[in-house]
Image (cartoon, helix red, strand yellow):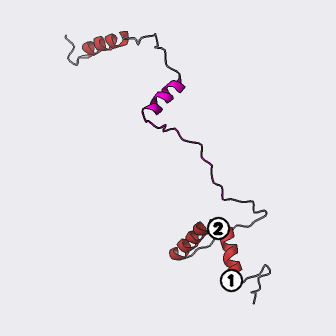
Amino acid sequence: MSDPFGFATANRVAAKIAEIRPDTEKGVEPPLAALDKAAEQLGFRSREAEEAKVMRRRREVGAGAQLNVKCPIPVYNRFIRFCDQERLPYWEGIEKLLDLAGVSQAGERKR
């Protein structure tokens, strides 16, 4: 009986593909500096990331306590926008607002 599903043909093709071997000789690659110089002369700019300073906003707070507050979304958005505009971490934003409200360390309102 002949091969109705074509497996024999597929096996022959697979055997031919397996015989294909890449060239083992590699061409001499030019140094990277030479490639970069040639690209620069032609007006190409490197897409490699430049080392950028990472901005850190977090400062040492010392001993602290967790504060979780549920508030209306518009109030939350105002507070986040305030801290972003003033470039303050949230705790410093709260501290600044308390200072503006005149609340002392002891909790009394300054007059």
User: What residue do we see at 59% from left, 43% from top?
Assistant: 51
Q: Quadrant of the N terminus?
A: top left
Across and down, in percent, residue 101 comes to 68, 83
Q: Indicate the amino acid at tag 2.
A: Tyr
The main secondary structure of the magenta stretch is: loop
In terms of depth relative to the viewer, which is nearer, 41 or 7?
41
The residue positioned farthest toward the bottom in the image shown:
111
**Image-based side of 43 in relation to 73, left or right:** left
Residue position marked by numbered label 1 in the rendering:
101
In terms of depth relative to the viewer, which is nearer, 21 or 56?
56
Across and down, in percent, residue 97 comes to 66, 77
The secondary structure type at the circle numbered 2 is helix
Q: Residues within 10 Å of mark 2 (few under 14, many from 20)?
A: some
**Image-based side of 6 in relation to 50, left or right:** left
Across and down, in percent, residue 4 comes to 20, 17
User: What residue do we see at 50% from left, 20% from top?
Assistant: 30
Q: Which residues are magenta?
A: 31-59
Q: Quadrant of residue 49?
A: top right
Image vertical order of residue 26 relative to residue 70, above or below: above
